[in-house]
Image: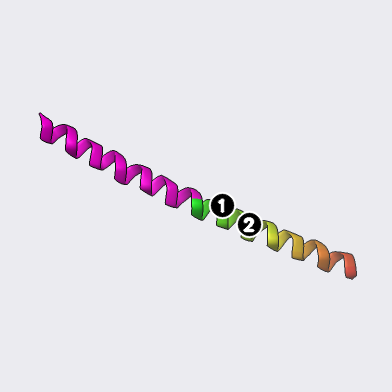
Amino acid sequence: MKKVILSSIQILFKYSLGIQKYQKNLYQLRQLYSNCVKINNDKNKYQ
């Protein structure tokens, strides 16, 4: 029984780490996207 609990905790831990990485990547992607939009808007302003 103890082994089952331990392995499920490990799985949960790995899963939450994965989520954290995913959220970090999502955040970076969002920043990249907003930077691109900003650059585009600036270009349009100066044309």
**Image side of residue 28 versus residue 36, left or right:** left
Q: Residue at x 37, y 42 (%)?
A: 16
Instruction: Indicate the quadrant where residue 32 lies.
Output: bottom right
Q: Are marks 1 and 2 in contact (CB under 8 Å)?
A: yes
The residues colored magenta run: 1-23
Whether 2 is drawn above or below 35: the answer is above
The kind of secondary structure element at disc 1 is: helix
Q: In the rendered image of this protein, does residue 9 appear above or below residue 25? A: above
Q: Mark 1: which amino acid?
A: Tyr
Front one among 2 and 15: 2
As helix, strand or loop, the secondary structure at mark 2 comes to helix
Outermost residue to the top: 1
Q: Quadrant of the N terminus?
A: top left
Q: Which residue is mark 2?
A: 31
Q: Is residue 22 above or below residue 44?
A: above
Give the image location of residue 35, x and y in percent.
69, 61
Pick the quarter of the image with the C terminus: bottom right
Which residue lies at the image location 53% right of the left edge and 52% below the top edge?
A: 26
Residue 40 is situated, as x and y percent measured from the top left of the image, at 77, 64
Magenta region includes residue 19 = yes
Kind of residue indicated by mark 2: Gln
Way the structure is coloured: rainbow
Q: What residue sits right under mark 1 in the picture?
A: 27
Residue 13, horizontal then vertical, whole percent:
30, 42
Q: Label 1 vs label 2: CA separation?
A: 6 Å
Q: Is residue 8 magenta?
A: yes
Judged from this view, the residue extending furthest toward the bottom is 47
Q: Relative to 4, does residue 19 appear above or below in the rendering?
A: below
Return the residue nearer the eye: 12 or 43. Answer: 12
* Disc 2 packing (10 Å; few <14; some 14–19; many ≥20): few
Task: Report the magenta stretch's main SS.
Answer: helix
